[in-house]
Amino acid sequence: MKQIKEKHSLAMRWCHWVNFPMLSVMIWSGMLIYWANDEYKVTLFGHTFFKFFPDWFYTKFHLVHRLSEGMAFHFLFMWFFILNGVFYVAYTLVSGEWRELVPQKKSFKEAWQVLLHDLHIRKMAPPQKKYNAAQRIAYTAIIVMGIGSVVTGLAIYKPVQFYYLTWLCGGYHFARIIHFVLTLGYVFFFVIHVVQVFLAGWKNFSSAVTGFEVINTKPIIEKAHDEEKS
Amino acid sequence: MTKKKVKQSLTIDQKINRRTFISFGVFGAAVAGGVFGWKWLYNSPDEVKGITGGQRVPLRRALNKTEIAVRRLFYNENHLVKTYPKSMAAKNVRYNSDIGIEDNKPFDIAAWKLEVKKQNGETLNVTLADLKALPKTEIVFDFKCVEGWDQISYWGGVRLIDFIMHYNLHDQTRLQYVGMETPDKTYYVGIDMPSAIHPQTLLAYEVNAKPLPLDHGAPLRLIIPVKYGIKNLKRIGTISFSNARPRDYWAELGYDYYSGL
């Protein structure tokens, strides 16, 4: 027999799907800004392994010479990004849903088992409630990262007025680096997230829109019948 | 019995279908609305070029409103820019732009005078020697370019507020803006009064304790640490005061008029 199992509250779905385009615009406009001083690279022992970003990347995505445009978009959409994040955190706190989201003591140990299970190395996944240990860590980390982006963002947006934030971030120069690295983190999160959503299948994706999943439970009568047979 | 059971499972199916239909309907409408809204914003026309230019109309409005909101909520003229010991200042001070001070333009540094235009039309001419006779202030701070780079640099000159007091221009500070232009009038900035009279705003004639070289704006440039580099005009020709926003080179090209930090 089919049953409706409530999974994601309306507020959760709302915040999730508002955040996606907001963060996309923030990353894109951030790229337009970064282009104007694209000095970050991965260098080890004097050898540069990767430069953020290669020229083909800028030309392919039309990111060249658009600093003022990028700033204008960035400083408009920051409001929506921040408000949506504040609402989400407030909601999870008030509703108590944070209990399913923040990592527990055992989560850090279990997350490895989840990872090994997802990579088909381990057969059994640890038992879980709504979210498994790896999800708890990821979904909490992404909120901490969001707060980090807002704090480092404000630190480079108004370093004189928010001098205490700039100090907290280790100065203007370092704040810009953290702001950039956090953005790389979002892209990494996004890739893993989308792969996982694909692997989890349509039913799971659908629940992120409708809020529920359909589960099939066998009626007790049939179950008794089955047992008789066996 | 069987009939009732079928009916019951149908109700659940109906519920599922109904909720799925509504959810995906709303989701689809929201996606369409988002795409439509984005297209509207992205394709919105550029502002008519005036004091500001080169930006989409709604984005310019947002820039102005955001700046005013942030200023009202957080601005405090007592917030000082962080300063550093002289030993941390860069020896080679980065030079990024020569708009208004190009090498091929004739400029006689010896004949230079600063022209101060009061709102009532009176003008005042000040020589470099006059400026050097005023109390000198030095600052070592992290100079920030709108492009994203920053560099600790060391400047010396007269605080703009000291200059204003010395030349009895206090009444001019009741106006809302200060405008500055290069002698050839090809680079120009507008500064809101609170930033102009900020205690760290300098009319600088020295960098690294030496007279300014030409590419850093000799003989006199603006050093305004509460603004991005684009507002730190090199080779000041004129200073004026007004209630209307003075013209501003980069604001005409899509940048925020205030560009404050």
Image: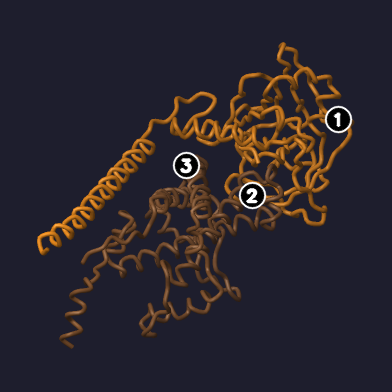
Chain colours: A brown, B orange
- Decide: is B93 above or below B134: below
Note whether residue B182 is visible.
Answer: no
Q: Amino acid at mark 3?
A: Phe
Precedes in sequence: disc 2 or disc 3:
3
Label 2 Cα crowd, 10 Å radius (few <14 / some 14-19 / many 20+): many
Local secondary structure at mark 2: helix
On residue A73, the disc is 3
On residue A155, the disc is 2
Q: Nearer the viewer, mark 3 or mark 1?
A: 3
**Mark 3 and mark 1, same subunit?**
no
Image coordinates for residue A187, horizontal then vertical, percent: 44, 61
Local secondary structure at mark 3: helix
Q: Looking at the image, which residue is at 78% across and 56% down?
A: B88
Q: Nearer the viewer, mark 1 or mark 2?
A: 2
Query: Picture quarter containing residue B129?
Result: top right
Q: Which quarter of the rendered picture does the N terminus of chain B lie within?
A: bottom left
Which chain does the numbered disc 1 sit on?
B
**Mark 2 and mark 3, same subunit?**
yes
Residue at mark 1? B129
Comparing B58 with B209, the one in front is: B58
Marks 3 & 1, CB-CB < 8 Å contact: no
